[in-house]
Image (tube, rainbow, N blue to C red):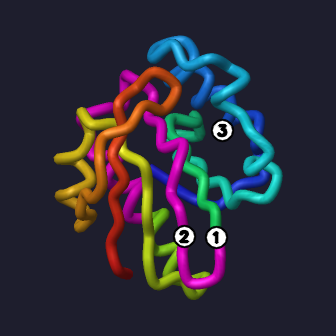
């Protein structure tokens, strides 16, 4: 698997649409927002086929990892963990010292294994329960 910063936003959006809009029923107008224009986008490919994506929003020493999506046929293969490790490395390389994210509650354990700690209450985001998480880089 290859994971890199990309300018191929269409490939990232196609994965996000499949996972969030089609699979999880997130309204398309909520899935895409103005932050996409300034975000750093990561694209994971397997044998040249786009299979995962994440976006990074950087504000000084803090970075937010979001829109993490892996196509269904690649889940359970370690692709998600590899994508997250690449996101953390990219943030470190850009001088970020704290990473945060809003995790879907069913994925809390996944992010905890990557060193994130949950804090604050559960909240609704696009009809899906989430909880904030963060970690030091």
* Image location (x, y in percent) of residue 65: 50, 57
> If the image is split into quadrants, where does the C terminus sit?
bottom left
Q: As drawn, is 4 to the left or to the right of 123?
A: right
**Residue at 57%, 34% in the rendered image:** 49
Task: State the mark number for residue 63.
Answer: 2
Q: Nearer the viewer, mark 1 or mark 3?
A: 1
**Residue at 55%, 19% in the rendered image:** 26
Residue 90 drawn above or below residue 114: below
**Residue at 46%, 84% in the rendered image:** 97
> Of marks 1 and 3, which one's residue comes earlier in the chain?
3
Magenta stretch, residue numbers: 59-85
- Say if residue 79 shows up in the picture: no
Task: State the mark number for residue 107.
Answer: none
The residue that disc 1 covers is 58
- Say if residue 90 shows up in the picture: yes
* Image location (x, y in percent) of residue 73: 37, 23
Task: State the mark number for residue 12.
Answer: 3
């Amino acid at each position: 698997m290859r994971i890199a910063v990309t300018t191929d936003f269409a490939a990232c959006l196609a994965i996000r649409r499949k996972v969030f809009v089609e699979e999880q029923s997130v309204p398309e107008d909520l899935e895409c927002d103005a932050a996409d224009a300034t975000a750093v986008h990561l694209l994971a490919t397997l044998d040249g086929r786009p299979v995962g994506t994440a976006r990074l929003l950087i504000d000084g020493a803090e970075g937010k990892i979001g829109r993490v999506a892996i196509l269904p046929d690649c889940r359970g293969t370690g692709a998600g963990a590899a994508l997250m490790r690449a996101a953390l490395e990219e943030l470190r390389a850009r001088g970020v010292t704290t990473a945060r994210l809003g995790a879907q509650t069913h994925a809390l354990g996944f992010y905890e294994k990557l060193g994130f700690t949950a804090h604050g209450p559960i909240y609704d985001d696009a009809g899906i329960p989430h909880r904030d998480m963060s970690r030091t880089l």
